[in-house]
């Protein structure tokens, strides 16, 4: 089964940028639909971006125009470029992989993103 490790989180000021990475091991992400989720304190985990094996990447309305997700199958890594960050973007960001064969879901441990002046 695939293991996922997120990195790139941190503390930035409003209007700043961060680039998150999710490195996969134990399997190729070619057979997985990938995604980024986030969970703020006291809130449900929510989808940020869905990165299918092929086709259009779908974004939550609250990040459209600010965040860009991508995948590099050769590096077995997915990315989330976050620009124009707002305090309400503060959350733990998680990487997700869903097998197109078994439909099993796998999660990383998350990376904290804090937007504050």
Image (cartoon, rainbow, N blue to C red):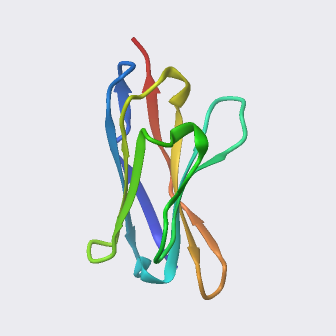
56 or 30: nearer the viewer: 56
Q: Where is residue 43 in the image (x, y as percent from the top left)?
A: 71, 34
Residue 99 sits in which quadrant? Answer: bottom right
Residue 113 x, y percent position in the rendering: 44, 33
Residue most extreme to the left: 75
Compared to residue 38, the image places residue 34 above or below, namely below
Of 101 and 68, the residue lying toward us: 68
Q: Which residue is drawn at 33% across and 37% down?
A: 18
From the viewer's perspective, is 47 left or right of 44? left
Vertical side of 18 occupied by 88: above or below:
above
Residue 102, percent across and down? Answer: 65, 85
Of residues 76 and 82, the one drawn nearer to the viewer in this rendering = 82
Q: In the visual, does 33 lie left or right of 75?
A: right
For the C terminus, the image quarter is top left
Determine the residue positioned at 32% across, 26% down: 16
Looking at the image, which residue is at 40% across and 81% down? 28
Seen in the picture, residue 85 relative to 79 is either above or below; the reply is above
Q: Outermost residue, top direction?
A: 117
Residue 71 position within the rendered picture, expressed as x and y whole percent measured from the top left:
36, 66
Q: How many marks?
A: 0
Residue sitting at 42 percent across and 43 percent down?
A: 67
């Amino acid at each position: 089964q695939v293991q996922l490790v997120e990195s790139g989180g941190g503390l930035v000021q409003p209007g700043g940028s961060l680039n998150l990475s999710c490195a996969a091991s134990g399997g190729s992400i070619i057979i997985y639909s990938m995604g980024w989720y986030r969970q703020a304190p006291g809130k449900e985990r929510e989808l940020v971006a869905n990165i299918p094996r092929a086709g259009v990447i779908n974004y939550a309305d609250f990040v459209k125009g600010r965040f860009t997700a991508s995948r590099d199958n050769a590096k077995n890594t997915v990315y989330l470029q976050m620009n124009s960050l707002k305090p309400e973007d503060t959350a733990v960001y998680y990487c997700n992989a869903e097998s197109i064969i078994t439909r099993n879901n796998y999660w990383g441990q998350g990376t904290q993103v804090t937007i504050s002046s």
